[in-house]
Amino acid sequence: MSETTVTVESAAVEASSCCGSCGTSAGAAPAAGSARTSVFQVKGMTCGHCVSSVTAELKKIDGVEDVAVDLATGRVTVGSTLPLADSAVAAALDEAGYDLVGRVEG
């Protein structure tokens, strides 16, 4: 029975971080102080290193204040003070090594 528990726990760790050594996680939702919130579907993210790379590149875009990555769904929520052009987001994600699938509406 404990073997099943270990398997379940391992699966949960894999979803949030590749090895846990970098201390990254899925992240929280952007702060309420951000004037705009945009959600993007991103392809290829699998671990904490992915979260770090995506977050770092997106934060280089003018106006971006907060980035939250949900590895389970592949959604990235960005809080910004300026409107975000999909082309700028796509370029940042490409630089990080991932693909923008599109903007999530609603």
Image (cartoon, rainbow, N blue to C red):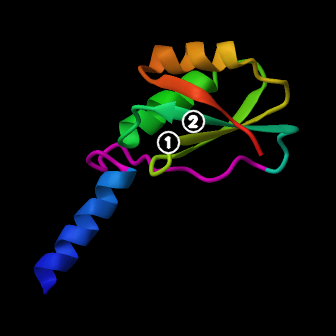
Q: Does 16 sit above or below residue 49?
A: below
Q: Residue drawn at (46%, 34%), measured in percent from left and top? A: 52
Q: Check if mark 1's residue and mark 2's residue have beta carbons within 8 Å.
A: yes
Q: Amino acid at mark 2?
A: Gln
Where, by quadrant of the figure, is residue 57 drawn? top right
Of all residues, the one furthest to the bottom in this rendering is 1
Residue marked by disc 1: 74
- Quadrant occupied by the N terminus: bottom left
Q: Residues within 10 Å of mark 2 (few under 14, many from 20)?
A: some
**Residue 75 left/right relative to 10:** right
How many residues crowd around disc 1 within 10 Å: few (fewer than 14), some, or many (20 or more)? some
- Residue 80 percent location from the top left of the image: 78, 32
Disc 1 residue type (three-letter): Gly
**Does residue 62 appear left or right of residue 15 in this picture?**
right
Q: Is residue 89 left or right of residue 64?
A: left
* Numbered range of the magenta stretch: 17-31
Question: Looking at the image, which is closer to me, 63 or 92?
Answer: 92
Q: Would residue 23 be found to the left or right of residue 64 on screen? A: left
Residue 86 higher or lower than 77, as above or below: above
Name the residue that disc number 2 marks: 41
What percent of the width, then of the height, locates residue 31? 76, 49
Earlier sequence position, callout 1 versus callout 2: 2
Secondary structure type for disc 1: loop
